[in-house]
Amino acid sequence: MPTAVDTDKSARVPANAPRNAFRISKGVESRTFRQAAFASAAEGFTQGLMSLSAYVAITSMGALEAGYEAEVATLITMLPSVAMLFATAYDTGPAVRGKRGYFLFAAGLGRLSYLLVPLLLLITGAYQSFAFVALVAFSALICAGVPPALNQLWGANYIPASRGKRFAWNSSLSMLMVMTGAFVAGMVLDAKPVFGGVENYVVLYPAAAVMGALALLGFYSIRMRYSESRAVPKGVLRRVKDSYGRALGLLRNDRHFRSYEVGFFCYGIAFMMLMPTVPVLFANYLQSDYGQFSRATVVTMQLTLMIMAPVVAWLSSGRRVTLVTAAGFSSLVMFPVMLALTAWTRDIVFAYAAFVVFGVAMSGVHFVWNLGALAFAKPGNALMYTSTHAAMVGLRALIGFPLGYVMMRLFPDTLHPVFGTAAGLLIVATTIVLRLDRRMVAQGLNPTA
């Protein structure tokens, strides 16, 4: 397969890059930025429309009445993360790198699968909520390659000097649209039924399906600059085995990247323990409607994140990625503390405060989750690092979500044990990354975000 090369005379190539490495010009960066703006906006609006899925499944599909709110909340938040285990299956071949056909596949089979949501009305009782969980999981499995494919796009079409700034602006636009989509979703779900006797989620999700497909088509339209890829093994099973073999080899051979992922692993377990508790907290402790839930958990958080993301990108530019990561992990400790205060007081004001703290902390974590792995990658194609980083999400989901669920069942009258354990894990994650930073500085290494 020929190498995609930009012909602009101002094209820039890293000094130590291989001969067949991609070239990036200012024109390439500008075109990518403009095209990605539309796609990022549509993607953000889609995520906002779907951000209440756990609350919809619990309160509108029979789970709360049947007493299965903990199970449904855990599954619907866990399975999309578990699907990330398959992210490495998308890190080889022309589908992601050259022809970008994967985006078409994800748009058609992944996002448009939500057109089937009205059919859930044929299912009664709590079975409807579990069927919805299965649909969410299927879509997540098909779309598991989107994060590494997008991270590869940022790595391929932006030079390191401008990558953080351009990523931050695209992220801010996406966050604005997530906030807008969540606000719209809360209004639609609390409004009078569009069709008599049928809740409005049967209209909301098909609309989100179409918007989500358009977003991926927007990313598909961006021509990706990439290095010539190696030979890809034939057969799906061989490709998956090969991709996992390379991911394990990468973690085994790159000690610093392995330590970085261990720190992220502890953070991820804490994060995933907390996610199922949020809809349970709002349903059982605060008895919130959809509007309150969306404004507190999504709109407040996304507004804070949108404001802070450019600030974090500016403060992080040129700084050691390990220090930026440790700052994000340590500041996140206050999130479970504020959730504990919410459960104790049953006052929604503390919930709003918790998600302000969450937004501030996640502005840093969001930055390093997307760009941190690229700081450890060698010059050239960084997809192996980004796909391995994304696949680790699925592995820790198999630990974090079940751990949170078990603790909710062991302590059915309180969520405080979950909150306390999560805070402790975040402190451990911070310590691991700071130790990595000291080791790398002692060796004269300075990977920047």
Image: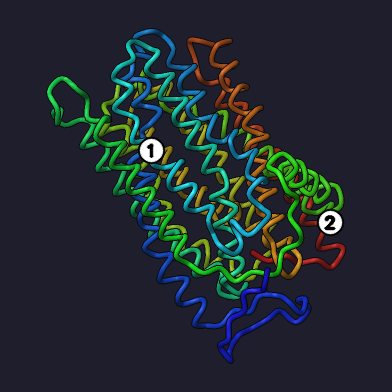
Q: Amino acid at mark 2?
A: Arg
Which element carries disc 1, helix, strand or loop? loop
Sooner in the amino-acid sequence: mark 1 or mark 2: 1
Image disc number at residue 339: none
Q: Which residue is mark 1?
A: 51
Q: Dividing the image into 4 quarters, which one contains the N terminus?
A: bottom right
Q: Residue at x 71, y 79 (%)?
A: 14
- The residue sitting at the bottom extreme is 9
Q: How many marks do you count on the picture?
A: 2
Q: Residue at x 61, y 45 (%)?
A: 330
Q: Place residue 98 in its image quadrant.
A: bottom right
Question: Is residue 431 something one can see in this rendering?
Answer: no
- As drawn, 9 above or below 407: below
Q: Which residue is mark 2?
A: 439
Q: Residue at x 46, y 23 (%)?
A: 73
Q: Nearer the viewer, residue 421 or 190?
A: 190
Residue 247: x %, y % from top left: 76, 47
- As drawn, 413 above or below 267: above
Categorize mark 1 by other alpha carbons within 10 Å: few (<14), some (14-19), many (20+).
many
Q: Residue at x 79, y 48 (%)?
A: 258
- As drawn, 335 above or below 364: above
- The residue sitting at the front extreme is 234
Q: Amino acid at mark 1?
A: Ser
Residue 16: x %, y % from top left: 78, 78
Which element carries disc 2, helix, strand or loop? helix
Residue 47: x %, y % from top left: 39, 44
Q: In the drawing, does residue 318 fall left or right of residue 281?
A: right
Separation of disc 1 and disc 2 at Cα?
A: 40 Å
Q: Place residue 288 in its image quadrant.
A: top left
